[in-house]
Amino acid sequence: MKKWFSLFVLCTLISLQAQNQPAIIPMPAKLTMASGEFSFNANSVIGHSKGVERIAESFQKSLEEDLGVSLQVRRQGNISFVLDKKVKGNEAYSLDITPKEIKVSASDQAGLFYGMQSLRQLLLFNKGGAEIRIKAMNILDQPRFEWRAFMLDESRHFKGEIQVKKLLDQMALLKMNVFHWHLTDDQGWRIEIKKYPKLTEVGSKRTNTQIGGWNSEKRSNQPHGGYYTQDQIRDIVAYAAERHIQVVPEIEMPGHASAAIAAYPWLGTSGKSIEVPVIFGKMPDSYNVADPRVYTFLKDVLDETMSLFPSEIIHVGGDEVKYDQWKNSESVKQFMTDNDLESPADLQIFFTNRISGYLDSKGKRMMGWNEVLGHNVHAYQQSEDTEVKEELAKSSVIHFWKGDLDLARNALKQGYDIVNSLHSSTYLDYSYKSISLEKAYDFDPIPEGLEEKYHHQVLGTGAQMWGEWIPTIDRMDFQVFPRLAAYAEVGWTSTNQKDFKQFKSTLSKLKDYWETKGIAYAKE
């Protein structure tokens, strides 16, 4: 009886502790409550140290948008943002709340920005009337991972800059720092390349769209198209940078290239003219990697892409390449012989290393889905040779998404950095039955059993919003929200600090905020 009573008391104390825990997503690394409260009202003043004017002004703007309150910004104030080298760690911050003042400190601008997001949430989730009372506390916080990404596929369904900026705003509130932008694929080319205008004149449009799921014969009977001009991309990249989000473009190669081949048929291995596909799945043709003109084309595309995106990382896809066209091409077979390449997988690695070397020469780093290592992870490849002789450049970042986790562990042991986006735990186009909110929240990017000495090579994780069956904004919102908040906590919060019950309690307040923003989140 005493045992059960003690367990009941313990559970009650834990429940009360969760109720008293300040509402912040993602959960901070260290939070200590103090006595008293700070009274926030229209007379509060925003202060800042030298060089922090933009952070202070950003906070001022967010208060106007979130709460309808307009505060003055001065050098001195009772809510201050201060650069302080004593706060150690990239993106780390300190948030001190006393009855007299609020002080956000960090050694870098990103840390100050994230401290501001925590303060925003404390105000948002406690608002009520002309005055908001926030309990005194101290937060010392730093992310678990440096790569906290959300991926948007606009090749399959173009969404436009208003939706992109809405997503960036919510990423910023949740301290996510990488917007992975999937801009080219079989069903649409979405980035203006001035040297090759047909990529958007032809490749950005399709005459119809498959609906009803994989292998369905149903069609929308409506054309679909859209792309971003270079000026629009610069604007979005700048918008993201103001929110401390780097935009990583993905330009697919050597597969998923049908839209480009439709624009310029000589790019394809078959050499045949095709239309932009109206169905989804794995298309048969790929870039003709034996043709020097293809390398010139891809370098030109990458040059214009790099001029638009300051990100250190350029994603080149590399997934789901079907090898049939290569195996049937006399020129490709001769190219393989000339370069002592024994299998199509070796050919893909050889090609990818040429692209990686070019990016290296430009001060960039290549990222690709884990097939770039030569992994045989698809049922349609089971007849392929499994022994690969070529070795991928070690500068590459491996984006792990499919296959046994031993593939990820082995890549780490071979010296590669990885981002773990295992599809069965991170794909936002999957149903809530397949990936529930709790399953998303419980995902750990560190593969189970991985030796600690390799942990630092796991840069983080990403949540992927693939767009094949997501034609509308509302449907996208439903798939993304609220799971985006769960992935934000996966990327930021240490496992020993995570608490799903506390997360759900805070999430209910975040959902109220999303209602005001017109975000059509899934009401589980």
Image (spheres, rainbow, N blue to C red):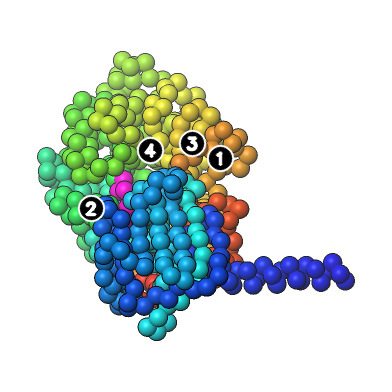
Marks 3 and 4: in contact by CB < 8 Å? no
**Amino acid, disc 1:** Leu
| Residue under numbered circle 3 | 457
| Mark 3 neighbour density, 10 Å: few (under 14) some (14–19) many (20 or more) | some
Q: Amino acid at mark 4?
A: Gly
- How far, Cα to Cα, is label 1 from label 2? 36 Å
Residue range (magenta) = 243-248
Instruction: Report the Cα–Cα distance between label 4 and label 2.
Output: 24 Å
Quarter occupied by residue 7? bottom right
Kindly identify which residue carries mark 4: 368
Name the secondary structure under disc 3: helix
Labels 4 and 2: the sequence-earlier one: 2
Along the horizontal axis of the image, is 138 left or right of 48?
Answer: right
Q: Is residue 228 shown to the viewer in this render?
A: no
> What's the mark number on residue 405?
1
- For residue 238, the mark is 2
How far is disc 4 from disc 3 in space, using C-alphas? 15 Å
- Number of the front mark, 4 or 3: 3
Q: CA distance from mark 4 to mark 1?
A: 17 Å
